[in-house]
Image (cartoon, helix red, strand yellow):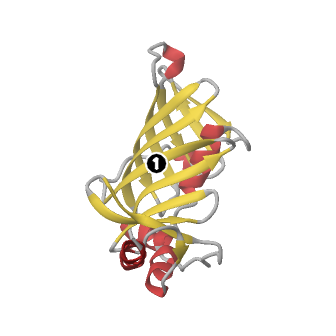
Amino acid sequence: MKRLVIMGCLVLVACGGGPRELSSEEATRLANVRVSNHAVRFASMDARVPTAAGVLRLVGRMDFVSRIGSAALSTEGRTDTAAGGELQWSPELLAVRQGPDWQYRPLQKGAELDTVLVLLTGLSADRPDEVPDSARWLRSDSAGGVAVDVFDTGSLTYWVDSAGRLRRLDAKIGDQTATITFQPGAAPFETLPDLR
């Protein structure tokens, strides 16, 4: 029995089981996630954002260099006109179209959707980030059929592939978690002049 316990512990250590500190290679990959986004520039995205009005779904694209996003909005379980539309956003401004015209408003602090939109526009940089000492490797996993390492930094969980590209991001917003998946290398898209 004692031998089985020891063998089990050795297997866990060999597989890197459980949350642990980052290796230097993992820390470098995590530090360069926003740099990788900047280099790729365009990515497809699919986000699920829990709100009091229901789970919002955003399917679209990000221009990480210009820090502008474009997506179709829907609300799971609803088909009324107010539950969907088209969105474009910059770090400060949101444009919504639910009919023929675009309506503009500033992004608001605290709102679940706006929090995710601001987060998305901040996922690009031209230099590596400082990785917090509290960052942890959680596990190996897959996102969209791609092998990733999952890193926890507190309110954000990064799913990063072997090339350092972000494949998924989980963001804690209050007591809920928004989930955003990415496919690097999307086609460019036309942005509204007022957002440029």
Circle 1 residue: 180
Q: Amino acid at mark 1?
A: Ile
- Residue 34 is left or right of residue 12, and the answer is right
The N terminus lies in quadrant: bottom left
Residue at position x 62%, y 79% in the image? 130
Q: Please provide percent x and percent y for residue 155.
A: 63, 57
Residue farthest top in this picture = 80
Q: Please provide percent x and percent y for residue 6.
A: 41, 78
Residue farthest right in this picture = 109
The answer, for residue 125, to whether it is visible in the render is: no
Residue at position x 49%, y 15% in the image? 81
Residue at position x 40%, y 50% in the image? 181
Q: Please provide percent x and percent y for residue 148.
A: 35, 65
Q: Is residue 166 above or below residue 8?
A: above
Q: Is residue 178 above or below residue 159?
A: above
Q: Is residue 129 above or below residue 62?
A: below
Q: Please provide percent x and percent y for residue 168.
A: 43, 55
